[in-house]
Amino acid sequence: MGIDAFTYEPLPGRVVFGAGSLDRLGEEIERLGVNKALVLSTPGQQSLAEDVALRIGARAAGVHAGAVMHVPIETARQARERAAAVGADACIAVGGGSTIGLGKAIALEFGLPIVAVPTTYAGSEMTPIWGVTEGGVKRTGRDPRVLPRVVVYDPLLTLALPPALSSVSAMNAVAHCIEGLYSETANPIASLMAEDGIRSMGKSLPRIVADPGDIGARTEALYGAWLGGSVLGAVGMAIHHKLCHTLGGTLNLPHAETHTAVLPHAAAYNRDAAPEAMARAARALGVMDAPEGLYDLAASLGARMALRDLGMREEDIDRVADLSVQNPYWNPRPVTREGVRALVSDAWHGHRPARR
Ligand code: NAD
């Protein structure tokens, strides 16, 4: 296999990684010259956010624990008002993709630097992609201003992430890696990260489910999350992300769980059209066939593998198929209504995607 022509544009940013790295947050804030940081979290992670604010002392301008899934416009407005009221010169987003998304909504308006302290594996901290939901529709875009300036990855903060949430969040990271391998804009560096990201998650997840306090496994999974986020930030995604975006936006299905149930079927859809990507993914998982390996990994972790178990009704299969073929993302195998319908139906039933 040769090397195809490619374009590669590395994104700026500083990553501080390792157990206990939250202790270095103060230095990082000082290094950025920040004097009034607004600390963001979900209501459920408020006490962690307060701890973070205490750590930076006088450089904290307060805690805003108003983040919710998919950044509804009202929550973005409230957070922007709060940031303006306290005269914030930076945001520290402590949490998963929802909290980092709220930080991005503020940065989009005011251009403030974001410091991200991720506590899930979703990967938003490594991307310039923002999203805001208004009137049931999620608008997304890319803007370099929303890319966090510093990311502090401390695996100690992930010990409290319940095993079920850890598994689906990690499969979300694996989805970025799988689609990165067969992306229209794939490049050798992103593919290295993608393959190693899949390997890290495949190795660490069974250990996390067996023992959520295994710091070695937690560290490896967070490393995989960094790689997954980096791939998402670096190259374009394909049918899997389009479908999950549609399912989340129109049916309000839970983000990471939807990724988990759809991924084996999206990979199966592209199985014959992207043989090199499939071989690399299979090698990373230590299996013969990537779609089957993805299914078996997630199922072995106890994840729900059928969209019907996530609240999707059978009559929605056609609607989702219709919406997913409108403005389709580039995909290695042409996106057809019939093909996508079969994919969604398989994910709805939760079949194992065996070769036919
Ligand atoms: P989330 O941020 O919604 O978190 C899920 C829940 O877990 C929340 O209640 C949160 O408080 C809790 N939680 C988070 N970390 C925890 C921990 N360590 N211990 C205990 N509880 C914890 O979930 P997510 O999957 O990280 O993010 C999903 C959102 O992120 C979606 O809206 C998705 O579209 C977005 N996203 C955006 C990008 C991007 O590049 N823009 C990338 C990935 C995901």
Image (tube, helix red, strand yellow):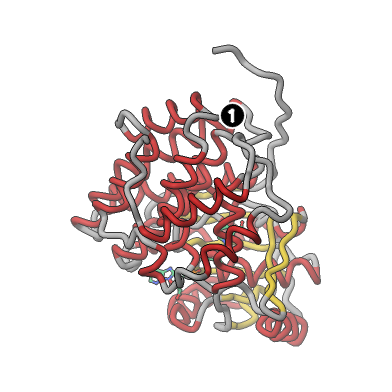
Q: In which quarter of the image is the C terminus?
A: top left
Q: Mark 1 points at which residue?
A: 189
Quarter of the image where one finds residue 245: bottom right
Q: In which quarter of the image is the N terminus?
A: top right
Quarter of the image where one finds residue 187: top right
Q: Position of residue 264 (x, y in %)?
A: 41, 46
Residue at 41 percent across and 56 percent down: it is 261
Residue at 45 percent across and 72 percent down: it is 313
From this viewpoint, is residue 156 visible?
no
Q: Is residue 298 left or right of residue 38?
A: left
Amino acid tagged 1: Ile
Residue at 75 percent across and 87 percent down: it is 85
Q: Where is residue 291 in the image (x, y as percent from the top left)?
A: 39, 40
Marker count (numbered): 1
Residue at 59 percent across and 75 percent down: it is 39
Q: In this view, does 280 lie to the left or right of 236?
A: left
Task: Name the one closer to the observer, 48 or 346.
Answer: 346
